[in-house]
Amino acid sequence: MKKQALQAAIAVTAMSALSGCSVLGIDFDDEKVKYESSNSRANLEVPPDLTPIGNDNRFQVPGRTSVVSANAEAARRQAEMDAAQTTTGAAVLPTTVVAKVMKDGAMRWLRVNVAPEQLWPVVQDFWPSIGLVVKAQDPKTGYMETEWAENRAKLPQDIIRSTIGKVIDFAYSTGEQDQYRLRMERNDDGTTDLFVTHRSMVEVVTGAQKDSSVWQPGPTDPMLEAEILQRLALRIDAEFNPNAKPEENLQRTEELKEALKPEPAPIKNEVVTNAEGVPEAVVVPEPFDRAWRTVSLVIDRMAFELVDRDRASGYFLVRYLDPDYEAAKKSEQGFFTNLFGSDKAVEPPQYRIHLGDEGLTTRITVQSADGGPDATGVAPKILNLLAEQLR
């Protein structure tokens, strides 16, 4: 009874608040992103083919304690910078270091005059500052991935929420979840490139009575990528140029906004097929250097786990579990295995996505992990996925 009374009270309050919406209107928060690092909602469960496989423990970066003194943090920063200087031979950082926005067609990324070893802990600390939790990180490949999170900035700031606040906040949901991947690349001149990609999942109502729902992949949002890049650039500036004046920071913010405006520039590609019409390669009309950056971003946005990459040899090594391949493998486990429900998880195969330099164009092929022909039959599907994302 008490529970019913509480629900009734909430409903009455909500209806009373609703009566004023036509007068007061519904407003949205000025913030473009507002994530919560922890909440009472259950974690988003993603289909198996969209869930990255856990990284090997030897690649994990030890986590820091959540509370440290200012002196301890300063000492840690200095120790990390000294260690990086010793191992990489980098010079002492100038106080005017800033993150520069780089452009290539529709692509935007940051170039920082700092070695990856010095930049890594700054980026680690950046994600919690905007309410996101790092799910996976691998210094070996310069890769970070956040947990799925709901962007609360998309919720309307109506009279009900402003009146009742978080008492019934659990009842509000955008039906969307975001995830970000960040990748670092070391340049020969000592600078570091930072790429950020966004992925989304959307809750779709299903069932004849519309009483259930499933999560499905949603679109990539270039505006959210630009917003994260802007905030990350400002965080890097504040870290390595702490004495900047307020007016300089304001001007810097406006410059970043202008530089990060997305400019759609679709890339046309050609899918090369054999006599049976099966895809054998994808040819993109870009030289190798540009194609490498383009394919890197595409891989980050897709359901692949990056295992390794070798620019000199022109390949990315990824793990990917194709749904049809998984179903076929499970059917091979036998009748009794399926009957008693003890079927084993299918191990995602590794694939080598190879980029061949052909001058003004680049040929993309999919091989086995060792560079030989693919034996799983999934290579043509991966080529089709790449071609779709490269359009």
Image (cartoon, rainbow, N blue to C red):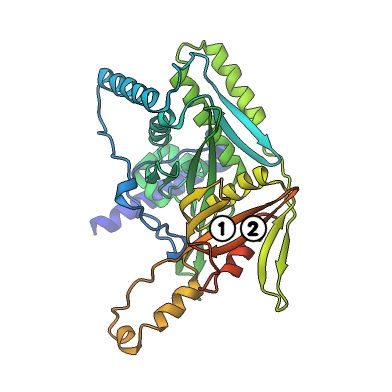
Q: Are marks 2 and 1 in contact (CB under 8 Å)?
A: yes
What numbered label is drawn on residue 353? 1
Query: In the image shown, does 228 or 136 lie closer to the viewer?
Result: 136
What numbered label is drawn on residue 364? 2
Query: In the image shown, does 339 or 209 lie closer to the viewer?
Result: 339
Query: In the image shown, does 180 or 267 lie closer to the viewer?
Result: 267
Q: Callout 1: few (<14), some (14-19), or many (20+) C-alpha neighbours within 10 Å?
A: many
Query: In the image shown, does 217 or 337 lie closer to the viewer?
Result: 337
Which secondary structure, mark 2? strand
Name the quarter where the N terminus is drawn.
Answer: bottom left
- Of the residues shown, which amino acid type is indicated by label 2? Ile
Q: Position of residue 306 (x, y in %)?
A: 47, 53
Lower sequence index among marks 2 and 1: 1
Q: Is residue 209 visible?
A: no
Q: Position of residue 172 (x, y in %)?
A: 44, 49
- Of the residues shown, which amino acid type is indicated by label 1? Ile
Q: Is residue 22 visible?
A: yes
- Distance from label 2 to label 1 (Cα)? 7 Å
Q: Position of residue 86 (x, y in %)?
A: 36, 24
Q: Is residue 345 left or right of residue 297?
A: left
